[in-house]
Structures are given as structure tokens and as C-alpha cells.
Amino acid sequence: MLGRLLVEELNPDLLSILKQPSVLEAFDGMDYLRQEWDAETHEQAAVDYCALFVLPKGVSPMAGAWLGGGEREPTGVHIQTVVSSIRARVDFPLPKSLAAAPPEHTGLLLFLGGQLACATDSELSQEAIPFLKATLCPWFHRFSEALANSTVSPLYSKVGQLLDDTYDEYLC
């Protein structure tokens, strides 16, 4: 779900998911999500999304923007190779919003990791954490922290915090 918020603007479908009690709880019952959503509110959400993920001074969801070239960091080519390998072996249908996403897009990486984790094949599901570690460590912390700190939108700030918590607890 968090990865989807990095790929598409907040829309009625996403809002209905975010307003479900179990999901809303993860967002600490955020008033931002509970508010009445009129045309002006939707427009502001679209502006926030574009400012973060489309405009050059935003927070790029592309791994390449966060790779520092450290000795233990993956390269963009490595990430693309890992993604291509998984996609060649497993035919996870991609949501429309991810169909054109480049292999190093954070939303796609989180989606594929989630699909692996939820796979009914136990061998495949055991590949989720190694896949996420191979594609997200150690740059993911820099991305999620920047997302949490670089927006006036409480939604994306919380998304950054949740992603950072996931990083700290499960990944690296």
C-alpha cells in the first residue's frame, strides 16, 4: 500500500483504502484522511504529489537518486538485474500504475517485495526479505527520511515515517 502512494496521486480508490479502520490505524487515525474531500482538497493532494515525486526539487522515488556509490551499496544495474530476475521467474501481474515504472522505482520494489512475501509458495515467500535487502539497502533510509522531512503534506510525511520504521525493523 505504501508503495502505491509513491506511484500514483491520491485518488478516490486510494482514499477508500486508506480510510479503512485497520489502515487508518497505521496512519494514527490521521485527520488529514478523515477530512471531507472536495475538489480543492483533491487538487491540493495532486499538487503535493507532484511537488514530491515529479518536480526536480522533490523526493525522487528512483533508487538511482539515492545511491551514494558506497562499497556495500547496490548499483542501479544491480537493482535492475535483481528485479528482472524476479520478474522473469514469477509473473506477478502489475497494477496499471506500475506497468510503466522503471525497475528501480521504489513503488515497484515495494510492490514486488510484498508480492513475494504474500506468495503461497513458501520458497518464493522466503525470497521477500533477501529481495528487499538486495534492492533497498542501504539507500532506502535516506529516501524515507527525506520523504518524512520534506513535505507539508501530513500524509506523505507519515508515509516516510512508516517506510523508515519498516527499514529499521525488517531490512538493514
Image: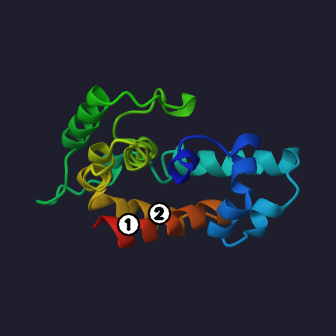
| Residue 18 seen in the figure | yes
Quadrant where the C terminus sits is bottom left
| Residue 153 seen in the figure | no
| Quarter of the view holding residue 50 | top right
Above or below: residue 91 compared with residue 154: above
Q: Nearer the viewer, residue 50 or 114?
A: 114
Neighbourhood count class around disc 1 (C-alpha, 10 Å): few under 14, some 14–19, many 20 upward: some
Q: Residue 120 placed where, x, y %? A: 40, 43
| Quarter of the view holding residue 156 | bottom right
Tags 2 and 1 touching, CB below 8 Å: yes
**Please, which colouring scheme is shown?**
rainbow
Q: Nearer the viewer, residue 13 or 10?
A: 13
Q: Nearer the viewer, residue 50 or 81?
A: 81
Count of all numbered marks drawn on residues in the image: 2
Q: Which mark is residue 50?
A: none
Residue sitting at x 88%, y 48%: 38
Residue at numbered disc 1 = 167
* Kind of residue at badge 1: Tyr
Q: Residue 13 placed where, x, y %? A: 72, 41
* Kind of residue at badge 2: Leu
Residue at numbered disc 2 = 163
Relative placement, left or right, of 6 versus 33 is left
